[in-house]
Image: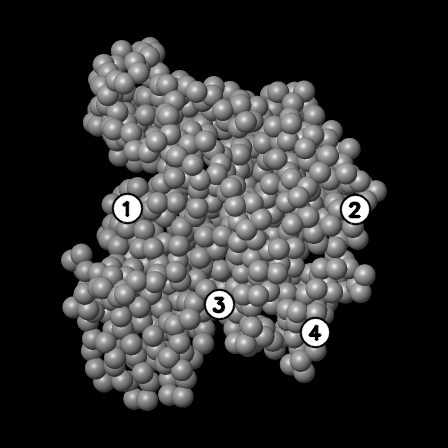
Amino acid sequence: MILRDGTTRVEVTALTDDIFRVGVFPEGMPVEYRSEAVVFDRQPSGDLSRVRVQHDPVRIAFEAHGRVFAADDAGVERFSKARAEGERYFGCGERTAGLEKTGSHQVFWNVDPPEGHTASFNNLYTSIPFVLSLVDGRAHGLFLDYPGRVEFDLAKADPDRFTAVGTDAFVYYVFAGPTPRDVLAQYTELTGRISLPPLWALGNQQSKWGYEDADEVRAIARGHRERGIPCDVVYLDIDHMDGYRVFTFDPQRFPDPAGFVAELEADGFKVVCITDPGVKVDEDYGVYVSGRERDLYCKTKRGTEYRNVVWPGLCAFPDFTNPEAREWWGDQQAPLVEAGVAGVWCDMDEPALFVPDQSTMPGDVVHPGGGEPRYHQDVHNLYGSLMARAARTGLERLRPDKRPFVITRAGYAGLQRDALQWTGDNSSWWEHLWMSMPQLQNLGLSGVSFCGVDVGGFFGDSNGELLARWTEFGIFQPFCRNHSCKGTVPQEPWAFGEPWEAVCREMLELRMRLLPYLYGLFDEAARTGAPILRPLLFEYPDDPVTYSADDEFLVGDALLVAPITRPGIEHRHVYLPAGTWGQWWTGERIQGPAHVLAHAPLGKPAIYARANAAIPLWPVLQHTGELPDELTLRVFGGEGSVTRSLYEDAGDGYGPYARRTVTCDGRTLKLGPCEGDYVPSRLRVEVVGRGVVEVPDGAFEITLP
């Protein structure tokens, strides 16, 4: 559908019956839909009868599932949508403050925020200009696709409007829902979904900027094993490099990288290395010289190599908008792969610069783009996503039989296809522990299902109680990593002695037990875009109480977690939505909806399981290399029937898998036929408070005790 509003051209396309694209192009501006965020590549096949158009001036609205939504309230050349009565806004990617964004002004411009940022600091490392709206339990979504600076006013300046400012010509997408689950499926159909990570990436991970040599890292790994604290991954921050030159190892501190990595691998540890985009200007450094000779760096307006200062000193910066530069960068990872490094951690990729302090590239820096030049101001938020893409595709080429593992600090819509989102440099504050919950929930509502914060906090000194409580929360993050800053007190799980060490150990053991459940949620996210850590409103959108319940969350559809986020207390309020819930530690059944006062002493966080949801558990493991061949399905009996999916495979590579449904009504448990050729684990069922029963081989239905 092509419309004219004066001299402005407006195009409306129904990509599917529930995904709509609107392009607004003032006179003299090209019709351009090119996007690094969008992967939808099918011919449009939707029903334009769902689009409502008014003329003079042109206004567009959408009607589906019994309601009108995303309706213009001004001429179409200005982005302004009427806010429906009672409409509430969520999402917006990586944000500070609480879950709900109604009445706020959101800035989308990637920055490296100052140490100790608070909820008043709006934009962070990643920008995803996507909003999920809820009205009377019905959801729709909107994504404004511009990787430069965008601002949303979500009924702040005017309580009856949602307005946006970005660029004169703009493209946006509308997702019809009508449930939050539908909106996320539609949004990730457009922008892509995560790929299933290697199983070890779900294990506990340990890092610190300050592990300065191989012996110190060995000691950290040994500390986990000697104390029986599960851990799968250790990290090498920038101190592993030779003069902070990316893709190198310091010859004194890490003289034998391959031997060092092999030694850790033999003890069940993977090694992940940090990479930064700044390439040291050094004529004796092959990475810099090869990039310069192939003309792969960003430019000034005068056509000279753009340079600025970061950790190595004066640096050049790859133009990741150029496909050739991305391929070149991916190939530079060969020394890491040859040393046995299992994954890549992309940092400083906003990009963050030191001159001036805490800055980024000027807007007039040129990205030559391999023949399609653009100013940095028009692609700024893409830089981190494209660096992560270069890393991922490079690992796929260099190690095609393994699933790539890439972390990014910065990115844009669609980054979930290439990397997990680590939320950057938080602080060892109780306030940041609390803020982690709505932050990760909104990332999940914005398509980024694989995400996590630094457990224990990065800046400042943690303490035993804070670390223990943060670990109680951290084991439920999709990405579980303890990480801290150079110069801060140690915060490894044993650093503060007892009773904190025992709490951290027990929580990380629970993480390992829950890995089969979490792995199934990753499979769901890869297939549907559903968040792993999700707000209550995702499953219960008809219950408005869930809209403000942002200090508790769901892990999948079967576990509700309500961490303690203040010192010196062990009771807290928990809201349980409709249904029967079982208290994880005591087995007590509670009928929701209900407000309860939960007792959550150290080591016993408030965890509730949905009745009749079969939750697969492993025995306690020290790392995922100890893959067992038996699963325990833990069930809290109750009323109603619940069907869940059980997923298994070898944990890495692209071999066979097994997926089957498990249906439980409290009296019987039924297994659906197995999809895939992987040989599934033997099963036993624990009905809490009633006993354990073995599932005979080949059985499809058993009676529960």
- Residue bearing the label numbered 4: 305
**Residue ID at (25%, 45%):** 542
Describe the element under mark 3 as helix, strand or loop: loop
Q: Nearer the viewer, mark 4 or mark 1?
A: 4
- Residue bearing the label numbered 2: 250
* Horizontal and vertical percent position of residue 445: 39, 50
Q: Nearer the viewer, residue 237 or 82?
A: 237
- In the rendered structure, which disc, 1 or 2, sits on the residue that comes first in sequence? 2
Q: Which mark is residue 541?
A: 1
Res 9 quadrant in image: bottom left
| Amino acid at dot 1 | Pro
Using the numbered discs, state the Cα–Cα distance from disc 4 to disc 3 in whole angstroms.
23 Å
| Amino acid at dot 4 | Glu
Q: Which mark is residue 45?
A: none
Mark 4: give few (<14), some (14-19) or many (20+) Cα within 10 Å: some
Using the numbered discs, state the Cα–Cα distance from disc 1 to disc 3 in whole angstroms.
30 Å
Mark 3: give few (<14), some (14-19) or many (20+) Cα within 10 Å: many
**Residue ID at (70%, 70%):** 293
* Horizontal and vertical percent position of residue 498: 65, 21
**Residue ID at (36%, 54%):** 188
